[in-house]
């Protein structure tokens, strides 16, 4: 939920950047701006959950972006596993 604490506009921007970066990291071209934003926001939730389980926390906008990117990479990895199956 850390992603949504910054406000809705900033969350959309961070989500979009996170989704785009995750697409680049996973050797893809992205899914388009709206899906990249959605992947980034869901990735932020997943990243926050995973880091919470590990007892890790990053503060600030940069920390939120890192958390969202890592969560989005995890999400894209899982999506690609199911698409290949």
Image: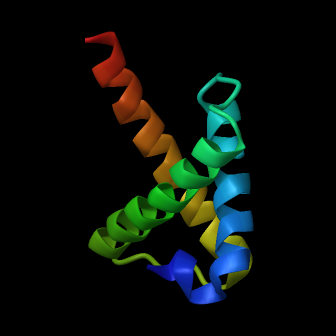
Please report the residue visible at 58 percent of the width from the left and 43 percent of the height from the top.
35
Q: Is residue 55 left or right of residue 70?
A: left
Q: How many marks?
A: 0
- In this rendering, the answer to whether 74 lies above or below 77 is below
Q: Quadrant of the C terminus?
A: top left
Q: Nearer the viewer, residue 73 or 83?
A: 83
- In this rendering, the answer to whether 3 lies above or below 24 is below
Please report the residue visible at 38 percent of the width from the left and 31 percent of the height from the top.
79
- In this rendering, the answer to whether 42 lies above or below 32 is below
- In this rendering, the answer to whether 31 lies above or below 13 is above
Q: Quadrant of residue 17?
A: bottom right
Q: Quadrant of residue 47?
A: bottom left
Q: Nearer the viewer, residue 7 or 80?
A: 7
Image position, residue 80 (x, y; %): 40, 23
Image position, residue 38 (x, y; %): 54, 53
Q: Quadrant of the N terminus?
A: bottom left
């Amino acid at each position: 939920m850390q992603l949504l604490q910054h406000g809705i506009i900033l969350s959309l921007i961070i989500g979009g950047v996170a989704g785009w970066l995750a697409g680049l990291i996973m050797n893809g071209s992205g899914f388009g701006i709206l899906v990249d934003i959605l992947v980034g926001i869901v990735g932020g939730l997943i990243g926050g959950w995973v880091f919470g389980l590990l007892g890790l926390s990053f503060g600030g906008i940069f920390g939120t972006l890192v958390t969202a990117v890592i969560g989005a990479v995890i999400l894209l990895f899982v999506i690609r596993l199911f698409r290949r199956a």
